[in-house]
Structures are given as structure tokens and as C-alpha cells.
Image (spheres, rainbow, N blue to C red):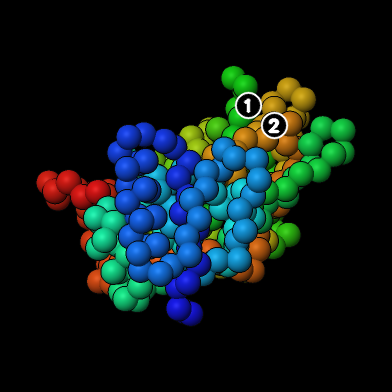
Amino acid sequence: MPKLERILIVAEASSEEIDHFVSALYSCLQSAGVDSICWSPKERDLPNIEQDLIIVIGGDGSLMSLLRVLGHPPVPIYGVNFGRVGFLMNPRQEPEALVDTLLGGAFVEQQLPVLSASWTISGGESGNAAGINDVVLERDSGQTVHLGLYIDDVLLNAYSGDGLVISTPAGSTAYSLAAGGPVVHPDVDGIVVTPLNAHRPVQFHSLQFPLIVPLGAKIRVVGEGCDKRPIRVVVDGESFSGIEELSVSARGDSVHLLRPQGYQYIQRIVSRIIGNGEDAN
């Protein structure tokens, strides 16, 4: 990684605590001779992403929102947790200590694959979005959905239920896990497909278990009777309605997330999901 000379500091939310942290961090970077810019996604003008590093202040939602705005850039990103779970973020440090961590190169890089989702909606119109967490196809009314699930153009299942969660390893600890899916280590290249409340009557033969497919797999989901059983897709928290057919695959690139030196994924699972009685920011 090149020497850090230009850093973008991003804070989506504003509070006394966050504003104080951002101000102190900016001052520390300036004192260290690093050209820094503070920016909020609420501002109209996009920042210059010709930076060496982006520091995100907030929670997982802030990180995913920023990545969406910037088009999931290749610029390394260091997240500082001011949210609740903050699984994608790093524990808070004092601004001076954080600057020492970054300028001293005391971090490791975690690569998160980007999923590309494209769809057609009623009337033949199309749409697309990208995400690092998950793509959720779910019912948009009180009716269950009927879906044809294809993996690499092979019909896997004619599914009936609440929908499907298609997640990356990074997203496997979110909605997919809550729906009964496995936690997948980020060093494993794969995509998780997890059914949501699948119908059990034998005439439906709905997928009852999660499935892990290679990262290069092509996933296609076709809705049936969408006029009566409307479907929506949610990509990293951004929702789109009227979906009739959805395709999901790896985009072929990754987001480069920085972690403090000594970061251990398994320990993160313990502290953030299993629980060990300790409060970690």
C-alpha cells in the first residue's frame, strides 16, 4: 500500500460525539502532514476519490451507504465503529492512536467481493445495483412468493415462501445468519443462498436448507404470478419493487477493508455474535 498522503474522512451521521471525533482526527492528520478532507454523503457534490484511504465514521449501514454512493471504489477503507453491531467496522481508538495505526501501517487488508444484481420489472424495464453484504429477494405483500431458483442455468428449486437471501461471506453474519444460514469465513470464496421461511408442504418441495455455491456461480431467480404475488429486492439496504426476474453474480472486484494489526475473524465472531461478556466498540 502506498504512503498515505491524502485521506477522505466520511461521517454520514452527526452527533456531538461523532463531530468531536472527526474534528480531532482531522487535526491529528493535518499535524502529521496528511492532506485530509471531511465529507458527508448528505452533501450534493461527490468528493474526489483520488485518495489513498477513506476513513468511515459510523456503523455498517454508513459503510454500505458510502460504498453505494461511490460505486464500490478500489480505494482502501478503514471503518471506525460508532454504530451498534459494527461487524464491518473497527473498534474505536483515540484519534492520535488511530493516526499512528494508519501511518505506521499497523493494519491488515480484508478483501470483500462485490455482488452485482440486475433485474427486470413489470413492463420490461430493468435495473441494477451492487453490494458487499447481501441481495434479498422477498415478498412485497401478504402473499408468499413462488420462485424458480437457477444456479448456472440449472433449475435447483421451484420455491415457495417469504423469499431468499443471497449473501457474500461478509454478509453471512447478517440477515442470512438470522434466517438460519451459515457463517462463512471471509477467506472462503463463495455465495450463500438462504431460504426465508420456506413452505414445507410436499407439493411445493421448497428449498429447506442454505446452499453455498462458488463465487463464480451465476444465480437467477424467476418470479411466478408476480401481479398477484409482488416481489421486491433489497441490495445492501436499498429497496426496489416490482421485480419479475433477478440475476446475481460476483462483479469480479473487491472492496479493500483495512483491519487493525492482530485482527482475528474468529475472535470477532465471539465478541459480536456469540458474546463473551465483554463490551467491544
Q: Quadrant of residue 162?
A: top right
Label 2, residues with CA under 10 Å away: few <14, some 14-19, many ≥20: some
Specify the label residue 140 is tagged with.
1
CB under 8 Å between callouts 1 and 2?
yes
81 sits left or right of 151 in the view: left
Callout 1 secondary element: loop
Q: Quadrant of residue 116?
A: bottom right
Q: Earlier in the sequence, mark 1 or mark 2?
A: 1
75 sits left or right of 91 in the view: right
Residue 122 vertical placement versus 235 (above, below): above
For residue 137, say whether it is visible.
no
Specify the label residue 241 is tagged with.
2
Label 1, residues with CA under 10 Å away: few <14, some 14-19, many ≥20: many
- The residue mark sitting in front, 1 or 2, is 2
Q: Which residue lies furthest to the top in this view?
A: 142
Callout 2 secondary element: strand
For residue 43, say whether it is visible.
yes
121 sits left or right of 82 in the view: right
Q: Please name the residue shown 31% across and 76% down the image.
A: 104
Q: Which amino acid does label 1 sit on?
A: Asp
Q: Please name the residue shown 34% across and 76% down the image.
A: 105
Q: Which residue lies furthest to the bottom in this view?
A: 2
